[in-house]
Amino acid sequence: MSLSGVAARLRLLATALLFSTGGAGIKWTMLGAWQVSCFRSGVAAVAVWLFVPAARRRWGWRVLVVALAYAMTLTLFVIANKLTTAANAIFLQSTAPLWVLLAGPLVLRERATREDLVFMGVVALGMALFFVGADRPQATAPDPARGNVLAAISGVGYAGVVLGLRWVGRGRVPAESLSATADEAATEAPSGASDDAITTVIAGNVLACLVALPMALPLPPVHAADVVVVLYLGAVQIGLAYFLMSTAMPHVPALAASTILLVEPALNPLWAWLVHGERPAPLALAGGATIILGAAVKSWWDGRRLPFAQDAGQASA
């Protein structure tokens, strides 16, 4: 599919907008966390399978291993949203880059740069602000302390997905073509990396559905509004969003894409406030702003450096 740069960016923006409604949607339904996780993921797996033909290819044991980490991320994110504020859930999940940078040298032997270490410190500071003091329980966030812990663990799971997809990509290209740093790796990703990611989305949602199913039964009374919300979360908030993202990403530079997708954590708390009147603690908002700002600056810095790295590589060839 050929898209203009503007059309691709608009699709990516729509992706971020859809992703951002997850917290408010999860809180809208009266179903419990296990029911939402099970049926949301079941619907999402079918929707992505139908919407994205590339997801029907490139299945293998490596992708299934990464799907386990994605299933953990999906499940913990839903449970966290039922326990703490939508802001806390999405901001703490957004600490995934911290765990990627910490584990990268051990798992993938990719060196962390000095700038990476500074970014790690910024994200760690933002994360610490969530655990200073105590959030006040509210109707949509009855157990914020436990929810914050689960949301932070979901960030570790998402880091596992990122590292796992890089590991899957290494299995598809010769070892000598792999980059020494994560920044250089972004410019040399294998052509099937996006297919691997979409396949992981399906497999992870299937696993999340199956894991949650025993805890989701027997079903409580289900109302029409619950059915509508779960269908929206699976088919639209995940399924349609991944279709838009899969068609847009090949036409948008990495820096622009990462910046546009920051709309998700920025808007997620807004929808929860507008729909449910949910108010995050001031320190949580400060921590979230620190994480988002750090990610934005890091993306901008990496975008500046990559063209110079590419020019140097071409000159030495």
Image: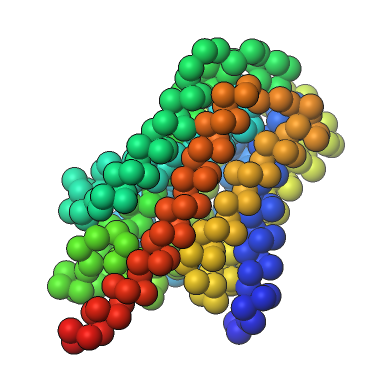
225 vs 33: above or below: below
| Left or right placement of residue 260 versus residue 221 in this view | left
Residue 283 vertical placement versus 173 (above, below): above
Q: Is residue 68 left or right of residue 15?
A: left
Is 121 in front, or is 207?
A: 121
Furthest residue to the right? 224
Locate the C terminus by quadrant.
Answer: bottom left
**Where residue 115 sits: x, y (%)?**
31, 51
Which quadrant of the rendered structure holds the N terminus? bottom right
Classify residue 203 as left or right of residue 231. left
User: Looking at the image, which is closer to me, 154 or 92?
Assistant: 92
Q: Position of residue 238 (x, y in %)?
A: 62, 52
Residue 73 appears in the picture as rendered: no
Quadrant location of residue 36?
Answer: top right
69 left or right of 230?
left
Q: Is residue 151 visible?
A: yes
Residue 224: x, y in percent? 84, 36
Question: Residue shown at 79%/27% (left/top)?
Answer: 277
Depth check: give the residue in front, 226 or 241.
241
Q: Is residue 189 above or below residue 121?
A: below
How many numbered markers are drawn? 0
- Residue at position x 62%, y 48% from top? 264
Occupied quadrant, residue 57:
bottom left
Colour pattern of the rendering: rainbow
Q: For residue 236, which quarter of the picture?
A: bottom right
The residue that appears at 64% across and 32% down in the rendered structure is 86
Residue at image position (35%, 57%) is: 165
